[in-house]
Image (cartoon, rainbow, N blue to C red):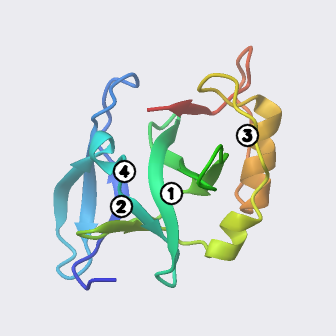
Amino acid sequence: MATDKTEVTEFERRDSRASTSPVTARDGETGAMTKHLSLGEWHGKGLVDRDGDKIGKLKDVYVDVETDEPMFGTVKEGHFGGHLTFVPLGGITIGPDNLQVRVLKEQVKNAPNIEMEGDQLSQSDESTLYHHYQLNYTPLDTQSGRRLARR
């Protein structure tokens, strides 16, 4: 992993339907707040775990519908007919060639297999996903109760 890292700490609020919200990030060396990559530019970037082991390429980003912050990304596992695996994006470090997450590859490999229906997760699948990664989960007080939306 290169030493030129930028840790995502805060997001500029935009229309929740926008897929290219720029990210306000803190430069790992200077601590200065800078504009860096929009979510649309994350697609296809390599994901590595906290030790630098390759996880896969980022396919989709799922944001929290209340905060518009990226919560999970998906990577495709398997070469033929593989399934999508969700990886938490909280505290992500943006490098020149990849995105480094705070979890280990083994935890990603053991993530629950979630079958997608379109681009939405059920409220039950969201809860399972958050709990697997030991993240707090509170469903929204809406008809669906879902917290995540694909960007």
Expressed as whole percent of the image width and height from the top left, the position of residue 74 reads 55, 48
Task: Report the amino acid beneath label 2.
Answer: Val
Vertical relation: 49 (above or below) 132: below
The answer to the question of whether label 2 and label 1 lie on touching residues, with beta carbons closer than 8 A, is yes
Is 104 displayed left or right of 96 in the figure? right
The answer to the question of whether label 3 and label 2 lie on touching residues, with beta carbons closer than 8 A, is no
Task: Report the amino acid beneath label 1.
Answer: Leu
Tell me the SS state at disc 1: loop
Vertical relation: 101 (above or below) 45: below
Q: CA distance from mark 4 to mark 1?
A: 15 Å
Q: CA distance from mark 3 to mark 2?
A: 22 Å
Among the two numbered marks 4 and 3 on one chain, the one whose residue lies closer to the N terminus: 4
Q: Which mark is residue 29?
A: none
Among the two numbered marks 3 and 1 on one chain, the one whose residue lies closer to the N terminus: 1
Residue bearing the label numbered 1: 89
Residue bearing the label numbered 3: 126
Task: Report the amino acid beneath label 4.
Answer: Gly
Among the two numbered marks 3 and 2 on one chain, the one whose residue lies closer to the N terminus: 2
Residue bearing the label numbered 4: 44
Tell me the SS state at disc 4: loop
Residue extending farthest top:
143
Q: CA distance from mark 3 to mark 1?
A: 14 Å
Q: Which numbered disc, 4 or 1, marks the residue closer to the eye?
A: 4
Residue bearing the label numbered 2: 8
Task: Report the amino acid beneath label 3.
Answer: Glu
Vertical relation: 49 (above or below) 80: below
Is 17 displayed left or right of 137 in the figure? left
Among the two numbered marks 2 and 4 on one chain, the one whose residue lies closer to the N terminus: 2
Vertical relation: 50 (above or below) 110: below
